[in-house]
Image (cartoon, helix red, strand yellow):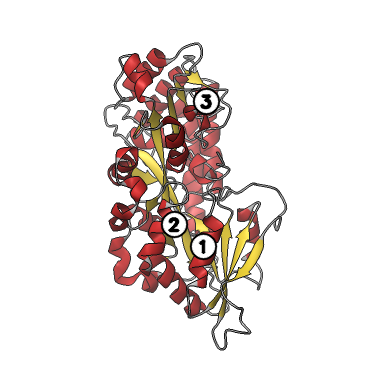
Amino acid sequence: MNFSRRHFLTLAGAAVATSTLAACGSNSGGLDAGSSSTPSGSGSAAGGNKPTLKHWYHEYGEAGTQEAVKKYAAAYDKADVQVKWNVGDYAKLLSAALLTEDVPDVFEAEMGPSIDMIKAGQVADLTDVVGTAKGRFDEELIERMTYEGKIYGIPQVADMHLLYYRKSLLEKAGVKPPTTFEELAAAAAKVRTKDVGGLFVGNDGIGPIPTALLYASGNDWLNQGRTGAGFLDESFYQALVKYRELFNSGDLLQSASKDWFDGSAFANGETAMQWGGLWSMTDIEKVLGDDFGVIPFPAIGSKGTQATMFGAFGACVSAKASNVQAAKDYVKWLWVDQGEYQVDFANNYGTHVPSQPALAPQCTKLASGPGADAAQIFTANGRPASHILWSGAMGEAFNAAVSNVIKKKAAPATEFATVGKVVASELKRIKG
């Protein structure tokens, strides 16, 4: 299985500004290592008066994706679109390019452009591009790419987290799929054997779980006024303490053959349950057939709710594009109007959810079984993996506090008092 991507859903409150939404790829190091640029047609010389546009993608792990996006670009007849497929640290490469005059005209960014890109005037306003089609997009997804009423990114496809469970192993242990955290902890203990872990969430025992705990305990990243943290609450602190108990119980698998973002540990029978990504479902199904199911993260605490998080790349237009209007027209054609390509992109290279929910029924992998359950979970329980105003400094403080609470048994209220100060300070800086 090739799952070198999806770092964005590792966020767990992470430094969103420093890890890019599924800005993954083989992580081979050098900025231009293995990157390629391919014209969509015969090139600008043969294209007459058609403008030439440079369109950047990061390296997707799913086979066939590169060929697909080049096919889409080639089908556009109003510009010669040159696709550049970037292998390595896409976030670093993109950040550097946006500071030069040789910018990509169109590029994808995790969860849309960062707040720093927007504030620096590096990206064009795409509100007019989306126009009346705004209602066709998942509401929370399009909102995640909106700042002060303006849309700066157009969602492509959505990836999401799920709790995978092995039907036969749970049935053998007399366990039902859990809907509360207490049931999850009890299930992990019952299905665990000397050869099979009860639950796997990552080789560090934490993975992206803090984000799930935040939402499942009924909290959010920021308060309603966007002036401070939205999780400085006893309900979140207790969720961390309860998870700490599970962390120390021995029921978590913490030495799997692959990390959480790869479905191998679950598919190979190393664990009875795994928190992982929808993108793994295709390969899991090849191994396990129908012997698995998916559910959201169970509710935790008195105000808790079942939840999951999702992320998506957003198509952006550089404010310094060689032809901003031509770039906008192309982006509208590709990610607003071309339903056929959006279904192809979501359905045939791993398993994903279209950013326009009305297209989901056309995706065969979401039509029945766990795929259909995933689509329903996305709609009913999905929340963004990060907030547009969440910065790297906030993420670093958040992650440090989570680690101290879970691994060092620190007092949550004490640890997160510091996080609250960082969040409030960063929000003042960003808004200022």
Furthest-top residue in this view:
194
Task: Find residue 161 and report its horizontal and vertical position in percent.
Answer: 41, 39
Q: Quadrant of residue 80?
A: bottom right
Q: Label 3 crowding class (10 Å Cα cut-off): few <14, some 14-19, many 20+? A: many
Q: Can you identify the residue that label 1 sits on? A: 69
Task: Find residue 380 and report its horizontal and vertical position in percent.
Answer: 27, 43
Q: Is residue 338 visible?
A: yes
**Which element type, helix, strand or loop, lies under badge 3?**
loop
**Which element type, helix, strand or loop, lies under badge 2?**
helix
Front residue (pair 375, 139) = 375
Disc 2 residue type (three-letter):
Phe
- The reply to whether the C-beta atoms of the residues labelled 2 and 1 are less than 8 Å apart is yes
Q: Nearer the viewer, mark 1 or mark 3?
A: 1
Q: Label 2 crowding class (10 Å Cα cut-off): few <14, some 14-19, many 20+? A: many
Disc 2 to disc 1, C-alpha distance: 8 Å
Disc 3 to disc 2, C-alpha distance: 32 Å
Q: Is residue 182 visible?
A: no
Disc 1 residue type (three-letter):
Val
The label shown at residue 345 is 2
Front residue (pair 161, 166) = 166
Q: Can you identify the residue that label 3 sits on? A: 205
Q: Quadrant of residue 300?
A: top left
The label shown at residue 200 is none
The residue that appears at 47% across and 28% down in the rendered structure is 266
- The reply to whether the C-beta atoms of the residues labelled 3 and 2 are less than 8 Å apart is no
Task: Find residue 339 and report its horizontal and vertical position in percent.
Answer: 36, 64
The residue that appears at 66% across and 62% down in the rendered structure is 36
Disc 1 to disc 3, C-alpha distance: 36 Å
